[in-house]
Image: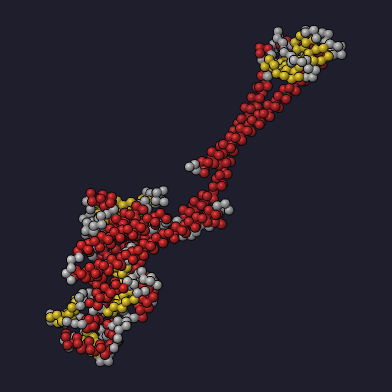
Amino acid sequence: MLSLRQRALLGGIASGALSVGVGTLAVFSYIDSRVSNRFDTALRDRHTQLVVGLSVTTQNPDFLRDLMFDPAYSAPYSGRYWQVTNSDGEIFTSASLFDETIAEPPGSPENVTLWTTSGPEDEAVRSAYQEITYEDGTVWGISVAESQTQLIDERRAAQRSLLPVFAVVGLIGVAGSLLLMSIILGPLRKLQTDVAHRWDSDDDLKPADYPNEVAPLVEDLNQLMRRNRDIVSGSRRHAADLAHALKTPTTILRNELQGLSETGVKTDIAQEALDRVDAQLSRSLARLRAMNTAELTHSRTDLAHSVDRLARLFSTIAERDGKVLEVKSDPELWVRMDTQDIEEVLGNLLDNAVKWCRSTVRLTAKRQEGCIEIRIEDNGPGIPEDARREALRSGGRLDTSVRGSGLGLAIAIDLLNAYGARLDLGISDSLGGLKGRVAIPTKISATSE
Amino acid sequence: MRVLLAEDEPHLCEQVKKLLNAEGRVVDIVNNGVDALHLGTTEPYDMIILDLGLPERDGISVLREWRGAGIKTPVLILTARDGWSERVDGLDAGADDYMTKPFHLPELAARVRAILRRQSGQLNPVIEMGNVVLDTRNGRVTADGVPVDLTAQEIAVLTYLAHNAGRLIPRTELSEHIYEYDGDRDSNTIAVFINRLRKKLGPDLITTVRGRGYMIDSI
């Protein structure tokens, strides 16, 4: 679909072209009319001059050539001609006609008749003709004619001088349309910016900051965002209630099985089945949460704060086992993820690293080109390359006895995928064990949006 | 040792109570947040096991109110909320430990013992008092290496005195920590338990300070 800007440009061009076209036609038509009128007036004046001249030379028409002193009447085919014809059919012409004559209109009109006919060498000429009876009783057909070449040249010159003006007018029209659209789109651009910043805070947009035509849309957006928030919190509440409703009974079942096994009853198969139920339940609940959260919230999380919170917890856990957690995080790092989700991802990866390392886990968080990068490295046994690919591909097989196949990694991958982020597994250059690299895009992609 | 269990699932309560009773601990059960807040504030528990998803009042807010009121009783959170954010929130709110459901009862018992040991400064789960040895992991007692059969109440009295060795325990305090909330707290029965323990474990283990209480010497 065309953007509003493209529509404005095309609309501006179309309306500019139409207005320039219509304007050009109107102005050219006016110029045509003005030039023709002026031409005809000049022709009438020359006709009058010839009529007056003939009035004193009816008895000796050849003398007219001396009376009509315009040099153009003397040069052959100069484009300016006169011709008089008496009732006997004798024709007297200007020297410019040389051996040619000018046609006379039919009907011998007694009023000056202007018409277009062909002159010498088939040249188009404009002619003024009138039949006049002088006081001495002689009747003369009197014609003056002028080549239309000059008229056409004059018209073309006027058109040529006006064309650039119309081109400028057309461009001004297009630019005006764009300017107008830009002014109209201003509030929409502000809305776009405000909505983008709105994801960073929980404040509603203010309809009063927008024109009357946009304010209802802003109110609708507020309602939509409130509804999204409600859906997310409802979904999370639902997931929490479901977790509580299912995990407590499975705990009771587990304890009953434990009691039975202590009396000698074989419960291994049942307990293993229960383990699978618990694991699948945890993963499904995490997926349920991730599904709605990533689509409906555009949360930002202070990563340094979350890293600090988790570091407190995992430092204690690591110290309990005689291990060390090293943390190095750039200040002012923000990620476009819900706080609980990013902490769940990092918590699962740290839990895995602390569990499998020999002595040291290192967490590094820093800004990279286009993303925030978090590395969690350890000096444990690592995961073979094939198993790493399998772990990332399948999202874990839920086998806690094999590193990289546990539930935590599967949940981390699900959550990161929901946000368009990714997890890579490799070998730590500095510690030699597993390296988990989380890359969270700094801009929301179209797919994750 | 007296434990408050705040959990709204009755079957789970029974399982946990049975587990802790077997180790000589007395357990009071509440099934909502309001009662948990009240008992945790007014009764001298040795530790509290707190579910977060309690009816009427959320466990986290109850815990924050206890800590705000200066209640220092150790708290173990036992919840279905297994997110890392929630764990950090729970520990930041003042919990001493955090366990998620589903859990194994033996692990819960071990964590309860660890918390109680830390609380009393006893780092070893096996407490030796001269020739008498108390294994807090299973409530078993030996005298001169010979197992001694004690009742649950006798184990409760011995455990409380052993965890507070070197400190004179008034009879009322002892009764507050070995009887349930609704139990008959006849302090004369305390004297009966003390006498039975002396007969089974030797006359010198527990010292009576007349009119003030009982004491086991520092270990």
State the residue lying farthest toward the bottom: B210
Residue A441 location (% of width, % of height): 38, 51
Image quarter of residue B216:
bottom left
The residue under the point 29% across, 71% down is: B12
Q: In the rendered image of this protein, does residue B76 appear above or below residue A160?
A: below
Q: Is residue B207 above or below residue A129?
A: below
Labels in figure, total: 0
Residue at 28%, 50% (x, y): give it.
A393
Q: Nearer the viewer, residue B168 or A414?
A: A414
Side of A64 where B94 appears, left or right: left
Q: Nearer the viewer, residue A172 or B31?
A: B31
- Residue A266: x and y in percent read 18, 66
Is residue B183 visible in this depiction of the protein?
yes
The color scheme shown is secondary structure
Q: Position of residue A54 (x, y in %)?
A: 81, 13
Depicted B88 relative to depicted A183: above or below = below
Decide which of A82, A398 is in the foreground and name it: A398
**Would you identify the image quadrant in which residue A262 lies?**
bottom left
Q: Report the residue at 28% width, 83% height from top.
A: B179
Q: Residue at x 30, y 86 (%)?
A: B184
Instruction: Using the rendered image of the protein, determine whether residue B101 is visible from the camera's viewpoint.
Output: no
Which residue appears farthest toward the left when viewing the image? B145
Residue A364, image quadrant: bottom left
Residue A28 shown left or right of residue A250 in the figure? right
Above or below: residue A212 compared with residue A36: below
Which one is in front, A111 or A443? A111
Q: Position of residue A41 (x, y in %)?
A: 75, 23
Q: Residue furthest right?
A: A135
